[in-house]
Image (tube, rainbow, N blue to C red):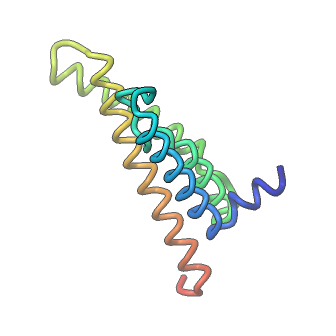
Amino acid sequence: MVVMFTAIATWYIMPIVILIIWMALTFLKKNFAKYWPKRLRIIDIMMLVLLLGIHGLSVTLTGLSLLPFLAFAASAFGLVLTVYLVYTEDDFRVRRFFVIYWRTLDIFIVGMYIILLLIEIASFLGIM
């Protein structure tokens, strides 16, 4: 358990782990395409790994995890997106909601991880 958290909290190991998992999933998707779910993208699976990275980086940088705040923001975004979709379209399509919701969360989580990683690199180099 301690070794796993150390690997997650170490900023230079986690991007390597993310890259290895990304390459493994790409290999699986290309070689087992007929078994891979059609609508499932690699970034959807990588969100779980990126959440671990965000947790490790945020604990290292601030001393507390940003995951509860991220969960609250994701819930608030889902509520706002629901109201927006019902207001702009007369019917609410669940599939459309989840596609927009997950793709937007994918972008947000990747962006948050990159920002935290850049802050960690800057503090490691003594820039910040």
Foreground: 62 or 57?
57
Where does the image place residue 2, in percent across and percent down from the top left?
84, 55
Where does the image place residue 20, in percent across and percent down from the top left?
56, 56
Q: Is 47 above or below relative to 121?
A: above
The residue positioned 49% from the left and 41% from the top of the image is: 28
Q: Is 35 above or below relative to 25?
A: above
- Outermost residue, bottom direction? 126
Q: Say whether residue 48 is left or right of residue 105.
A: right
Q: Say whether residue 84 is left or right of residue 102.
A: left
The residue positioned 44% from the left and 40% from the top of the image is: 31
- Outermost residue, front direction? 31
Q: Say whether residue 44 is left or right of residue 127.
A: left
Which of the image's four quarters has the C terminus?
A: bottom right
Foreground: 60 or 48?
48
The residue positioned 62% from the left and 61% from the top of the image is: 14
Q: Is 14 above or below relative to 86?
A: below
- Outermost residue, top direction? 91
Where does the image place residue 44, in percent across and percent down from the top left?
45, 39
Residue 34 picture quarter: top left
Where does the image place residue 75, in percent across and percent down from the top left?
46, 32
Foreground: 36 or 126?
36
